[in-house]
Image (spheres, grey):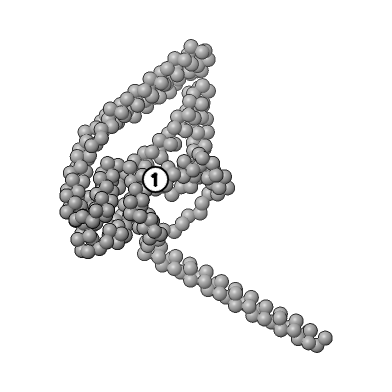
Amino acid sequence: MDNLAQLTIGATLLFCVLATAGVHTYASGKAQREALVHRLSSTQQIPLGRRRRFTGVDRRLKRTGVGKKIENRLAATGLDLTPGEFFVYMLAAVAGFWLVASSLLAAFFGPIAAAIALWAAFAFLNWQRQKRIERFINQLPELSRILANATQAGLALRMALAMAAEELEEPAGEELGKVANALAVGQSIDDALGALAERLPSRELVVLVTTLVLSNRSGGTIVSSLRNLTITLEERKETRREVRTQLSQVTATAYIVPAMGLLMLMFMDNMWPGALDKITASGLGQAVVLMSLGLYGLGFFLVRRLAKIEV
């Protein structure tokens, strides 16, 4: 009986000692982690993560095909959004546009405004992706120069890409970091650079990737090729800037004309209260309104198409 009591007391004391040691280890580890995060964030080496919203919606959405497409588009834009957050914000925008159009114009314009808001959400993703591609293209001359200097110094192409990822700013630094990570886990240079060209499609990047891949396969002199490519990319960068400046007025016209049509509708409804309700009350009036909106949309598409000049 005494042995059982001593064994129980000993086991209890051992459990208390282990529990105390575990709590102390956990507390010290947590304090060290917080100190490390604070030190790195203060020197801007890593960003502090934010709390994600709508995690339940995000988990369910990622299981669907639509969620995967949204996730791929968000990854190409570089936005700090999850598919669930974007989906909820998009639904809120659709509902808000519906209510605003119904209250300011007429009930008939509610679904039309909701459809426009839905299109505008995905157009916003495409716009952000195109902006990121443009920034990446502007960094290509510097990227080519860094790779040429690194290879001339005797570094392998894998090491040159990793060094460029550390020296360049966003988005080139992030994208090249993905390439370096892919090479570190065993992917070939062809596959890693091909994935980069798929994420950020552009003629300039395709030329650079093709030059790197062919030089890596054949073992030729990559330095002279990159030097010549740097000069070509600088010239194309200036040409693209000039073309964009020349077409800025045309691009502004594409947005101003539909905006003028919307303002005219609001002005007419303000001058004659209830005019839009009377117009959209009949089938003929609804058909005329839809035809007018279709013509505005066609004009917007044609102007944007004419202003899109590939350099």
User: Of residues 65 and 24, which is closer to you in this image?
Assistant: 65
Q: Amino acid at mark 1?
A: Ala
Q: Nearer the viewer, residue 263 or 284?
A: 284
Q: Which residue is mark 1?
A: 76
For residue 19, above or below residue 87: below
Image check: 9 left or right of 67?
right
Q: In the rendered view, does 182 fall on the left or right side of 23?
A: left
Q: Residues within 10 Å of mark 1 (few under 14, many from 20)?
A: many
Q: Horizontally, is 39 left or right of 216 in the view?
A: right
Total marks drawn? Answer: 1
x, y (%) of residue 289?
A: 44, 17
Q: Nearer the viewer, residue 181 or 106?
A: 181
- Position of 17 relative to 110 (above/below): below
* Residue appearing at x 52%, y 12% in the figure: 282
Query: Horizontal and vertical percent for residue 32?
Result: 48, 71
Q: Position of residue 200 (x, y in %)?
A: 34, 45
Does dot 1 land on a helix, a strand or a loop? helix
Based on the displayed image, in which of its 4 quarters is residue 242 positioned?
Answer: top left
| Residue 263 appears left or right of 239 | right
- Residue lying at the far front of the rendered structure: 218
Q: Quadrant of residue 239?
A: top left
The residue drawn where x is 20% and y is 42% is 236
* Furthest-right residue in this view: 1
Q: Residue at x 75, y 81 (%)?
A: 8
Which quadrant is home to the N terminus?
bottom right
Residue 274 drawn at (x, y percent): 50, 18
Q: Is residue 253 visible?
A: no
| Residue 3 visible in the snapshot | yes
* Pick the front one: 213 or 247: 213
Q: What residue lies at 38% left-to-right and 60% top-to-bottom?
A: 184
